[in-house]
Amino acid sequence: METIAYISGKIETRNRECFIGDQKVDCPQTGKTFTTTGDKLDILPQIPYLEKRSDPIFFIILLAIITLFSVLAIFKTKIFGKSLVEYIVPIWYLILISIVAVAWQYLFGLKIDDGLMSIRISQWIWEICIAASAYKLIKTANFGYSNLFFLGVLYSFIIHGLKVTIRYLFYEKTFLYLTDRFLYGSLLVMVIVFIGGSMFLFFRKKGIINF
């Protein structure tokens, strides 16, 4: 007879074999890539060099990103013909809603046992905010594809930069997992911006929607 055991715990990988504690178990989702601590990777392969944590490196990168956007705002640097203020001011309330949705997800959503429905709803909220931002900026600021690209970059750092920071500080994730999630999330943001933005630009060109 074969006994099937359901074991709960954090899966660790050692030499491509999976363990919970010292007990060997079948690796979940064959064909998927995992970090050494059992976190699933969606884009990156296993990169041992990134399987680590370092507070100095993390905070240097975080400070560099904050400094970069601060300099762009202070000196009113033009990015594809628009300053950072011109990107942010018309949609500041949508950005704020997105930040609140992400914070709510980690503060409350993860604690609700509803089959992850609360998490999905919080994600739908910031996805709607991104699409609405593209529409708003196309309508009020005559944005084009290059501007939409930077809008995607901006939202990627706001939403997934915040998520990466939370995961590093409170969930002790490695650089490999954080990089994978940031890239995956940023790809999703770009898809929403360009699909939504392309539709609005097409409708405007055809005269279906008059801005």
Image (spheres, rainbow, N blue to C red):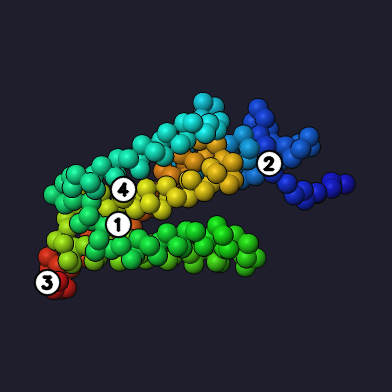
Structural crowding at the residue carrying mark 2, measured as other residues with C-alpha within 10 Å and reported as few (<14), some (14–19) or many (≥20): many
Tell me if label 2 and label 1 are in contact, CB under 8 Å.
no
Looking at the image, tell me whether mark 4 or mark 3 is earlier in sequence order: 4
Q: Does the rendering let one see residue 108?
A: yes
Looking at the image, tell me whether mark 4 or mark 2 is earlier in sequence order: 2
Determine the residue positioned at 56% across, 40% down. Answer: 173
Q: Nearer the viewer, mark 4 or mark 2?
A: 4
- Marks 2 and 1, how far apart at CA: 36 Å
In front of the other: 70 or 17: 70
Determine the residue positioned at 52% across, 40% down. Answer: 177
Residue occupied by mark 4: 153
- SS state under label 3: loop
Determine the residue positioned at 33% across, 66% down. Answer: 93
Q: Nearer the viewer, mark 1 or mark 4?
A: 4
Quadrant for the C terminus in the image: bottom left
Residue occupied by mark 3: 207
- SS state under label 4: helix
The amino acid beneath tag 1 is Val
Q: Nearer the viewer, mark 3 or mark 2?
A: 2
Numbered tag placed on residue 178 in the rendering: none
Looking at the image, tell me whether mark 3 or mark 2 is earlier in sequence order: 2
- Marks 4 and 2, how far apart at CA: 33 Å
Estimate the x, y position of residue 61 in percent, counting from the top left.
41, 35
- SS state under label 1: helix
